[in-house]
Image (spheres, rainbow, N blue to C red):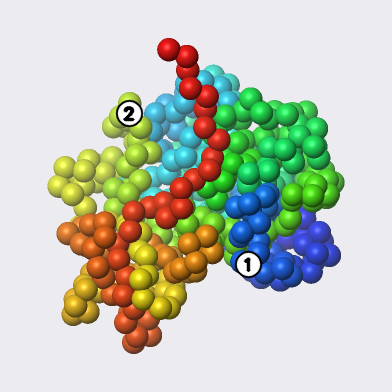
Amino acid sequence: MKQTPLHEAHTTLKAKMAEFAGYDMPIQYPEGVMAEHNWTREHAGLFDVSHMGQITLEGEGVTEFLERLTPPTMPKKEGVAKYTVLMNPEGGIIDDLIVTRLSDHKFFAVINAGCKDKDIQWIEENLPATIVLTHLEARALIAIQGPQAEAALREALDIDASDLNYMRYMEHKDFFISRLGYTGEDGFEISVPQDRAEAVWHKLLSHKDVKPIGLAARDSLRLEMGYPLYGHDIDATTSPVEADLTWVRGKKLNTTFIGNDRVMAELAEGPKRKRVGIQLTGKGVAREGAEIFSADGQTQIGTLTSGGFAPTLQGAIGQGYVSSENAKSEEKVIIRVRGRDIEAKIADMPFVQPSTKKAPKKAA
């Protein structure tokens, strides 16, 4: 198994380690998943996400190239990040990723750990001669998430990000700092050279409001937000319309991207299935693969793709795909878990309102 530059730091902290996307990663620390989840919501959690891929694309025509691979038009301003999806010719999702404009002809992107090899291969297969892809393998990635993240960044690392808005990017010496994350909390992802990662990790952990958080709590945090997890809630067969991700296209519609034909057809005709939130109203917890039935338990209408206990809500939630005619908020359903039926309902996502930083209102 591969290891991140922070592997020794995790084992020293007695983290429970397990394989994830080919890496030996911390699943939880001794305090446990519930405590880690709540600490992130109330204070600041520190995550090692160095297993994810970091790349740059640079050259003449790079904006147009990215608008062929992904549905939205790219940000025009430097330092603006955008969540999007990498598309295949069949209209399916190769990966979801964050793309940030660095300059007129350069973008920075963070891609999923389990997808980075196929992502890079796909991009290189389509790459014009004028554009260079660079895989930033010598950099680590650390996320700090929670209401005290900004203060911890300032007090532990002497980095003032108070003027940095959500989905925005700044540089501090050789650090790349983006105000974003996958927990619904205010926070930052910090790209640092590998040989600096352990020092940065320990400095942040020295702050009274910061604790290390494993992948299990990261998953429960993103599930409460209704964010999709690649390989589970979305994959190469899933369209953005089915996945309820058509909003990534933005207001200025791009119709030149690979896979656009399927997207346009599903927008016109409606998809056969739709990703929805599920909130269990009966006792029990449902996981990926549980079957979703109509309220009378007679007809299967879908399948759960993610599920678990939501510490913030003190109840079980999930997300999955149901036939479009059943994708109505508050509609009662049955979740069948190993032959046992649990009452549930279709729920709006996010399950918990995000606490990301809001841009200041402009004066009238």
Compare residues 98 and 344 and report the one nearer the observer: 344
> Residue 215: horizontal and vertical position, in percent?
62, 61
Please rate how many residues cluster around mark 1, counting C-alpha atoms within 10 Å: few if below 14, some from 14 to 19, many from 20.
many
In the displayed orientation, state which residue is furthest to the left: 269
Quickly name the residue at label 2: 251
The foreground one among 215 and 51 is: 215
Which part of the image, by quadrant, shows the C terminus? top left
Residue drawn 65% across the image and 61% down it = 36
Q: Position of residue 92 (x, y in %)?
A: 34, 51
Q: Amino acid at mark 2?
A: Lys
Q: Is residue 66 above or below residue 271?
A: above
Number of numbered discs visible in the structure rendering: 2
What is the distance, in whole Å, between disc 2 and disc 1 at their CAs? 39 Å
Q: Position of residue 103 (x, y in %)?
A: 58, 21
Q: Give the amino acid type for the residue marked by disc 1 in the picture.
A: Val
The residue depicted at 21 percent of the width and 72 percent of the height is 294
Residue 78 lies left or right of residue 226; in this view the side is: right
First in residue order: circle 2 vs circle 1: 1
Q: Residue furthest bottom?
A: 339
In the figure, 236 relative to 145: above or below? below
The disc at residue 33 is 1
Depth check, mark 2 against mark 1: the one in front is 1
